[in-house]
Image (cartoon, rainbow, N blue to C red):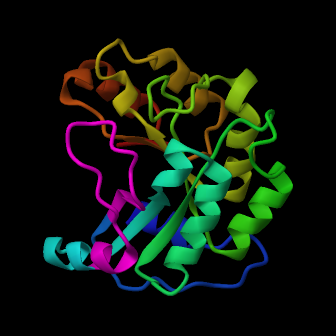
């Protein structure tokens, strides 16, 4: 419910938005579009209607959705495609995929935040992995810091992809730095694996702004 409040709560000057339901079930890790199919499972395109059908079958009321093009190709293009797909589906809450601000691959931060505010985008995704479906950037202040500061000030929750850490030791110190430098930023670690619990629980105990 805390994520729902942050996702649906507009930033300053946008007016009010009422929750769709009192205690909905929300899935924060959902994508639409056709994946490139790097894995062994054939890639299938998932459109909004099929996604809503699957949500109904699973008892999910709302979903924070990003577009696979934003993860696998171009965040800017994928984010704009996402808005086209979910604009007529109030149960699908748009989640923008973001990058560090230095390469010109997405709008400047003020313009980007204005676009997010206009479309009530209250959840952002980061995919810093170095694999085929990652964006290859450091989770450090000198790299992604300006984006985190902007999202913190705009009260936009961040979902950090954690599946990239399955085979190696997670960069716990990077998570500590993010939570320490951005205490008002809600950071949700996505796809966390159970074998990380000993370090993860220590961080959850220390930082009230960290979630899984």
- Residue at point 30%, 28% (across, down): 201
Quadrant housing the C terminus: top left
* Image position, residue 111 (x, y; %): 83, 59
Q: Residue 76's quadrant in the figure?
A: bottom right
Q: What span is colored magenta in the figure?
A: 27-52
The answer to whether any part of residue 200 appears in the image is: yes
- Residue at point 64%, 85% (across, down): 16
Above or below, 135 against 170 in this view is: below
Q: Residue 103's quadrant in the figure?
A: top right
Within the magenta stretch, is there residue 34?
Answer: yes
Taking the image as shown, residue 140 lies to the left or right of residue 19, namely right
Taking the image as shown, residue 42 lies to the left or right of residue 48, namely left
* Image position, residue 100 (x, y; %): 71, 35
Above or below, 189 against 91 in this view is: above
Q: Residue furthest left?
A: 57
Q: Nearer the viewer, residue 81 or 199?
A: 81
């Amino acid at each position: 419910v805390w994520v729902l409040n942050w996702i649906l709560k507009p930033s300053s000057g946008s007016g009010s938005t009422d929750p769709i339901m009192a205690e909905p079930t929300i899935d924060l890790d959902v994508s639409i579009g056709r994946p490139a199919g790097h894995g062994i499972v054939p890639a299938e395109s998932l459109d909004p209607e099929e996604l809503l059908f699957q949500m109904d079958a699973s008892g999910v009321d709302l979903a924070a959705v990003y577009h696979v093009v934003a993860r696998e190709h171009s965040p800017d293009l994928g984010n704009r495609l996402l808005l086209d797909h979910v604009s007529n589906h109030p149960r699908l809450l748009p989640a923008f995929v973001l990058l560090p601000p230095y390469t010109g691959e997405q709008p400047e931060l003020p313009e980007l935040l204005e676009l997010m505010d206009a479309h009530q985008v209250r959840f952002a995704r980061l995919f810093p992995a170095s694999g085929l479906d990652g964006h290859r950037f450091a989770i450090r202040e000198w790299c992604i810091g300006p984006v985190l500061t902007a999202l913190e000030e705009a009260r936009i929750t961040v979902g950090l992809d954690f599946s990239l850490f399955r085979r190696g030791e997670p960069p716990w110190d990077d998570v500590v730095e993010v939570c320490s430098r951005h205490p008002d930023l809600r950071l949700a670690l996505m796809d966390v694996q159970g074998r990380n619990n000993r370090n993860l629980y220590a961080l959850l105990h220390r930082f009230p702004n960290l979630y899984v």
